[in-house]
Image: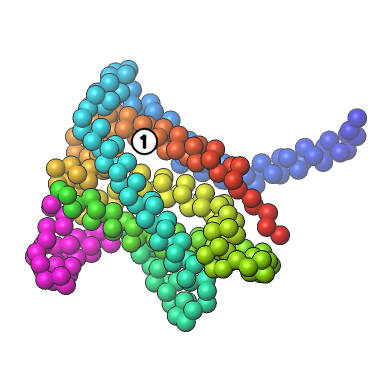
Amino acid sequence: MQRPGLRRARRRNAIAGYAFLAPSLFGVACFLVLPVLVVIWLSFQSWDLISPARWVGLDNYRSVLTDGVFANSLLVTLVFVVIVIPVQTVLGLFAATLLTRGLPGSGVLRTLYVLPWICAPLALGVVWKWIFAPTGGALNAIIGHRVEWLSEPQLALPAVCAVVIWTNVGYVTLFFMAGLLNIPAYLLEAGRLDGAGPAALFWHVKLPLLRPTMFFVLVTSVISTFQIFDQVYALTGGGPQRRTDVVAARIYYEAFESFSFGRAAVMAVILLVILVAITLAQQLYFQRRITYEMD
């Protein structure tokens, strides 16, 4: 049986702990939980921002789920994610491997790699729109041929993917560098003593120990890529022929151009469900393949 003094001390410690957590809990409740609840409530309403909200039940869900426009946005987003995630992950891992070797100029390259990621995405989108411009654009001037990079249906999505990869590869590189530098030197030395070459050392020592970093990078990258909006809005506005009409852009256009906030809320709820499902699947895949203790 615990002594009264010990119980009081534990109670005081618990109260102090919750007091320190209170500002963070308040922020999570106000800026994360409450907005999600409001969006879920709004998905059952018909509201145009002017008239009073009107309860319509599941009508918004039926409308969205039978809407070919939203189905196209989901398909475009899935293709977009399938292109962007593998390419930027491989490029980031390759760049991190080179930058952790201590080659001349590595410090400058580390800064240059991160610069696009810390810049405003909308501003970068405007710059890249000028680069891709068919008349007077930098890219067409370099290749000496006129190409409609952003207005040609077959080229628009790959062009947007290229911009997003270029923007995010520094972010991926940064975390892979941290993971590589955290690998104990004695493990690498043990691999070399066992006769492992650079390729075998990477595949059988470094890559398995990078799984916690890989998990973090994939989860955050998938979430951010599914929610991509700024670059699409600046480069193509969802066109041509809805070939770049990703879900986040469709939510924006539905809410602030069509003023159908109920339908936009339904799309946001569906996107949330998809992201939660993908994140849980990633966690289930990695939970038995990750080791966090390397000392």
Q: Who is closer to the viewer here, 35 or 191?
A: 191
Q: Which residue is mark 1?
A: 271
Seen at 48% across and 63% down, the residue is: 174
Percent x, y of residue 257:
19, 39
Residue 208 is one of the magenta-drawn residues: no
Left or right: where 266 falls relative to 155: right
Residue 251 in view in this figure: no
Which of the 4 image quadrants contains residue 110? bottom left
Looking at the picture, does residue 250 appear above or below residue 262? below
Amino acid type at mark 1? Leu
Looking at the picture, does residue 278 appear above or below residue 119? above
Which of the 4 image quadrants contains residue 241? top left
Seen at 17% across and 49% down, the residue is: 154
- Mark 1 secondary-structure assignment: helix
Quadrant containing the N terminus in the rendered view: top right
Percent x, y of residue 208:
58, 54
Looking at the picture, does residue 16 appear above or below residue 262? below
Which span of residues is magenta-colored? 123-152
Percent x, y of residue 255:
25, 36
Seen at 50% across and 41% down, the residue is: 282
Looking at the picture, does residue 50 appear above or below residue 130? above
Residue 136 is one of the magenta-drawn residues: yes
Q: Residue furthest bottom?
A: 104
Crowding at dot 1, Cα within 10 Å, few <14 / some 14-19 / many 20+, comes out as some
Percent x, y of residue 36:
42, 34
Residue 152 in view in this figure: yes
Left or right: where 284 falls relative to 38: right
Seen at 66% across and 66% down, the residue is: 194
Q: Who is closer to the viewer here, 81 or 122?
A: 81
Which of the 4 image quadrants contains residue 71? top left
Q: Who is closer to the viewer here, 214 or 272?
A: 214
